[in-house]
Amino acid sequence: MTTEKIDNETLEFARELLSIVTLCKQWAASKIPKDGLSLPRMQILMYLRDIGSSPMRGLNKHLGTSATNVTGLVDGLEAEGLIVRSPDSKDRRVINISITKAGMRRVKAEWSKYEKNCASTFADLPASKRKQVMKSLNILREQIQN
């Protein structure tokens, strides 16, 4: 579909979705335990936990932020012993980032708290409504990914 044929209802839908994205980011950040990792640091550790290791550009893409921001986050995580940098075996210009055992322990402990904090928001929402929203979210995910 070309952008010239977008009707007002579709524009309103897109605007509402964008406002929900902003609200969700704020909500997600508010659920971080006060003594815990920041959301971007947690996202890096979760990503590395799931894929093993990543070059810096992979972290930039995953977080959707600049190399400068990711470098600062990686520096902090490395200083705490939660990740390590290592040269790529095929391309010496590339530095891969991997999670350490200490990082795995930290993310396991903190993710559980964070997930429970997030889930508490929806504890009073009836299961039927949660299922309805999940179905809609899956439709949105598929549409955005296509």
Image (spheres, rainbow, N blue to C red):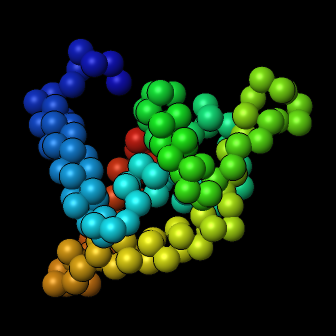
Q: Which residue is most to the top?
A: 4
Q: Residue furthest front?
A: 79
Quarter of the picture holding the N terminus: top left
Query: Which of the 4 image quarters holds residue 103?
Result: bottom right
Front in this rendered view, residue 56 or 50: 56
Q: Residue at x 32, y 18 (%)?
A: 2
Could you say where residue 30 lies in the image, as x and y percent from the top left? Answer: 22, 61
Q: Is residue 127 left or right of residue 77?
A: left
Residue 130, x across and y down, in percent: 27, 75
Q: Nearer the viewer, residue 18 or 73?
A: 73
* Residue 9 visible in image: no
- The spot of residue 27 in percent (x, y) is 21, 58
Q: Quadrant of residue 38?
A: bottom left
Residue at image position (38%, 55%) is 39
Evaluate whether residue 75 shows in this view.
yes
Q: Is residue 68 above or below residue 30?
A: above
